[in-house]
């Protein structure tokens, strides 16, 4: 009885490329970018802001808008004045060291702006700015 020669397997393990370390690095980089990124939240309504000669740039964590119809907007939702404090406290939990910026339309009532500012301060945010347009 003649013996047949033994052949090596076609797919040799030494020729395979191991993708696991590459995928690990990609996922670690993805997690890093997600954790270190900051998200800017929009109030959900366009506001015509008053103009001023001087202003400073702010990066708000909480953005509140009051339109010309005296509607208050936070995170693209219209909210009642009584809900402002609760909503701001929720957003404050997400970014504890953040500040707040209020965008009030030129046609909105000043009294409503003051009441919104009071609600924000009652929510525990002392660093509140009013957004304006530079001339």
Image: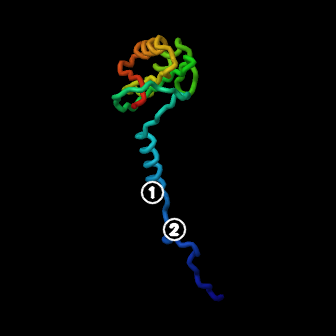
x 43%, y 44%: residue:
33
- Examine the rendered structure and indicate whether residue 86 appears above or below residue 99: above
Residue 112 % position (x, y) = 49, 13
Which of the pair 122/31 is nearer the observer?
A: 122
Q: Which mark is residue 16?
A: 2
Q: Residue furthest right?
A: 1
Which of the pair 36/16 is nearer the observer?
A: 36
- Examine the rendered structure and indicate whether residue 102 appears above or below residue 18: above
Dot 1 falls on a residue whose secondary structure is helix
Q: Which mark is residue 50?
A: none
Quadrant of the image containing the N terminus? bottom right
Residue 114 % position (x, y) = 44, 13
x 39%, y 19%: residue:
125
Which of the pair 94/131 is nearer the observer?
A: 131
x 46%, y 34%: residue:
40
Q: Residue furthest bottom?
A: 2
Q: CA distance from mark 1 to mark 2?
A: 14 Å
Q: Is residue 91 visible?
A: no
Q: Which mark is residue 21?
A: 1
């Amino acid at each position: 009885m003649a013996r047949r020669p033994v052949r090596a397997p076609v797919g040799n393990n030494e020729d395979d490329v191991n993708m696991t370390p590459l995928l690990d690095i990609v996922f670690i980089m993805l997690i890093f970018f997600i954790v270190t990124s900051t998200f800017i939240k929009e109030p959900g309504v366009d506001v015509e802001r008053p103009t001023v000669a001087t202003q400073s740039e702010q990066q708000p964590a909480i953005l509140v808008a009051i339109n010309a119809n005296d509607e208050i907007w936070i995170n693209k939702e219209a909210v009642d004045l009584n809900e402002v404090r609760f909503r701001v406290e929720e957003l404050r939990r997400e970014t504890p060291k953040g500040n707040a910026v209020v965008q009030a339309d030129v046609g909105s009532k000043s009294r409503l702006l003051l009441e919104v500012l009071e609600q924000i301060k009652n929510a525990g945010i002392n660093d509140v700015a009013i957004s304006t347009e530079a001339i």
